Image: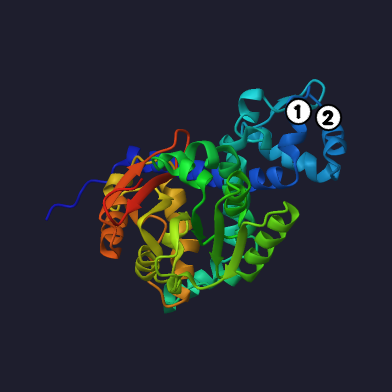
Amino acid sequence: MAVRAFDEAKSEAFAGSMLEVLNGAAIALMTSIGHRVGLFDAMADQPPATSHEIAQRAGLTERYVREWLGAMVTGRVVEYRPEDETYSLPPEHAAWLTRAAGLDNLALQAQYIPLLANIEDPLIDSFRNGGGVPYSAYPRFQLLMAEESGAVHDAALIDTILPLVPGLPGRLQTGIEAADVGCGRGHAVNLMAQAFANSHFTGFDFSEEGIAAAGAEAEALGLTNAEFEDRDVSNLEANGRFDLITAFDAIHDQAHPAEVLAGIADALQPNGVFLMVDIGASSKLDENMDRPLAPFLYTVSCMHCMTVSLALDGAGLGTMWGEQKALEMLADAGFTQVEIKHVEGDLFNNYYVATKSGGHE
C-alpha cells in the first residue's frame, strides 16, 4: 500500500486552527469571568473609559480588570485607544454578551467551559477505569442551568413554547393537572403556575437543593397551585394522573431514560400530551459536522451529561443522542404520534410534541 505524501500546507493550516482553538479557549474563560462579575454589563452603552473607571463602575479591583481587558482587547472583543488608554465595548459585541441581550447572551454559555474543566481529573480516571463523575461534583451546574433556562422561559415559555401544542393554552386556562420532569430549581413550573391559576403543577427532581429553591420561589410568589417533590423520575408512580407533562433538556441526562419515558407515558391521561424539549442534533455523527456548536455540545456531553448518567450505572445516553434515537425511544415508550417543532432563535433544541392516542384536544 502506497504511503500518502505528507501535505505541508494541510499541516500548517491545522497548526493555525489549533492556535485559534487555544486563543478561543482562553477567551471563553475570560468571557465567563466577565459575565459573572458584570464587566460586560458595566461597559455596555458607555463611552470609552480607563481601566480604573471601568473597575470603579463595576465595583471590582482595577489590577484584575486591567489584565482581563488585555485578554479581551487582544481577543478582539473589546476595543482599545492607546492614545488615552481607554477601552470600549462595541454595541455590536454587547448585543451578544450582556444580560440585556437575553436569549442572545453567549457569555452565559461561556460559563460551561470553566465549570467542566473542574472535573477533568476524575473524568480522566473514568476514561481509564470506566464509571463516571457524579452530579455532586458539579456544584454550580444547576445554578448555571437555571440561569440559562430561566432566560429562555422568561422570554418564550408562556407565549411561544406552550402554544406549540394546539389548544394547550386554552386547556391550561380552564384547568388541568400538569407536571415537569427534571424540574431543577422549578422556575418553569412557577412561571406556568403564575400564568394559569386554574391548573395545578408538580415539579419532580432528585436534587434536594433544586426542590428547596423551587419551593422557596413558589412561596415568594404566593403560589398555591405549584408543588415540588424530591423523586427519582424513573419511578414516577403516577398512573394516568396528568394531562400535560413537560421535560426541558432533561431526558438525555437521565440514568435510565427509557424507564423515565415509559413512566411519563403511563402518567398521562389517554388524551395527555408530553412536551419534550431536547437537543436538536442528529444521532449520526456525520450529519452533525456543520451543526452550530457541535464540538461544544459533544464536550458538554462527555464532561457532564454522559458521565453523570454512567456514574449511576446508567445508559450514558449523552447530550447528542439525536433526533432519530429520540423518536425511537418515544415510540418504544408508547407514544404513537410525535411532531417535531422549532422555536425561532433557539439554536439548540427540538420541541417534541408526543401523544399516546394520536391526537390531543
Which residue is situated farthest in the left direction here?
A: 1
List x then y, in percent, for residue 243.
43, 56
- Disc 1 is placed on an element classified as strand
Which residue is situated farthest in the front direction here?
A: 174
Q: What residue is shown at x 43% (from left), y 79% (from top)?
A: 129
Judge whether residue 209 can be spotted in this image.
yes
Q: Would you name the residue on which mark 2 appears? A: 50
Q: Out of 237 and 200, give the one closest to the viewer.
A: 200
- The mark nearer the N terminus, 1 or 2, is 2
Q: Report the Cα–Cα distance between label 1 and label 2.
A: 6 Å
Above/below status of 152 relative to 219: above
- Label 2, residues with CA under 10 Å away: few <14, some 14-19, many ≥20: some
Left/right placement of residue 339 relative to residue 91 reads: left
Residue 13, image quadrant = top left
Residue 10, numbered label: none
Q: Are marks 1 and 2 in contact (CB under 8 Å)?
A: yes
Instruction: Tell me the quadrant of the picture where the C terminus can be found.
Output: top left
Q: Out of 241 and 3, give the one closest to the viewer.
A: 241
Q: Out of 237 and 282, give the one closest to the viewer.
A: 237
Q: Would you name the residue on which mark 1 appears? A: 87
Left/right placement of residue 67 relative to residue 106 reads: right
Q: What residue is shown at x 73% (from left), y 42% (from top)?
A: 68
List x then y, in percent, for residue 147.
63, 49
Q: What residue is shown at x 62% (from left), y 31% (from top)?
A: 76
List x then y, in percent, for residue 132.
47, 73
